[in-house]
Image: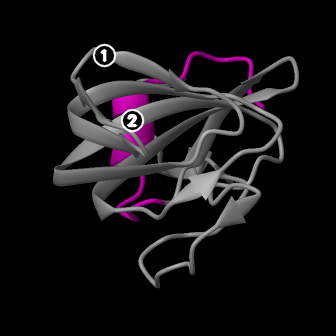
């Protein structure tokens, strides 16, 4: 990881893939990931870790088995470990997540993975596509 400031706007502008997070930095043993999302993800569970969401732009819905949490720009929510959940965003959103390095985006237990969901542990951010004016 680079030791220069990273513009989240530039990071998000550097890719178009949905449900395919990019790792912008690491904090101790955690990835800080950004993603563009639209439509539905899948029901999944992280057995050993909580999952933190911050909505940077748009609206994110997180279905839990007993309710749906609706997050707007600037809202945060943590899904507790072992909690089955399904993120979605009918109108699209940009989000930031904190997850332990190596955490799969589809959790430890999940429904069948649809084609539009990237089952990954996060992709390294393509720094060569970032705006050089923002990152000397």
Residue 64: image location, x then y, percent:
42, 42
Quadrant in the picture for residue 10: top left
SS class, disc 1: loop
SS class, disc 2: strand
Quadrant in the picture for the C terminus: top right
Mark 2, mark 1: which one is toward the viewer? 1
What residue does disc 1 label?
75
Q: Which mark is residue 95?
A: 2
Q: Residues within 10 Å of mark 2 (few under 14, many from 20)?
A: many
Please name whichever residue, 4 or 81, is drawn nearer the observer in this view of the structure.
81
Specify whether residue 10 is painted magenta.
yes
Which residue, as the protein is rendered here, is positioned at the far right?
29
> Magenta segment, which residues?
1-19
Whether residue 131 appears in this view of the structure is no
Residue 21: image location, x then y, percent:
54, 51
Q: Residue drawn 57% across and 48% down?
A: 84
Would you say the magenta stretch is mainly helix, strand or loop?
Answer: loop
Q: Residue drawn 22% across and 30% down?
A: 57
Please name whichever residue, 21 or 131, is drawn nearer the observer in this view of the structure.
21
Query: Number of callouts in the render?
Result: 2
């Amino acid at each position: 990881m680079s030791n220069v400031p990273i513009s989240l706007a530039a990071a998000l502008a550097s890719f178009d893939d949905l449900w395919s997070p990019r790792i912008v930095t690491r904090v101790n043993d955690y990835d800080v990931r950004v993603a563009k999302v639209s439509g539905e993800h899948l029901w999944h569970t992280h057995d050993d870790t909580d999952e933190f969401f911050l909505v940077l732009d748009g609206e994110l819905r997180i279905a839990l088995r007993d309710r749906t949490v609706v997050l707007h720009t600037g809202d945060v929510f943590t899904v507790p470990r072992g909690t089955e959940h399904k993120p979605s965003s009918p109108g699209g959103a940009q989000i930031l997540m904190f997850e332990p390095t190596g955490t799969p985006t589809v959790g430890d237990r999940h429904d069948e993975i649809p084609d539009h969901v990237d089952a990954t542990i996060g992709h390294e951010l393509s720094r060569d596509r970032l705006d050089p004016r923002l990152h000397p």
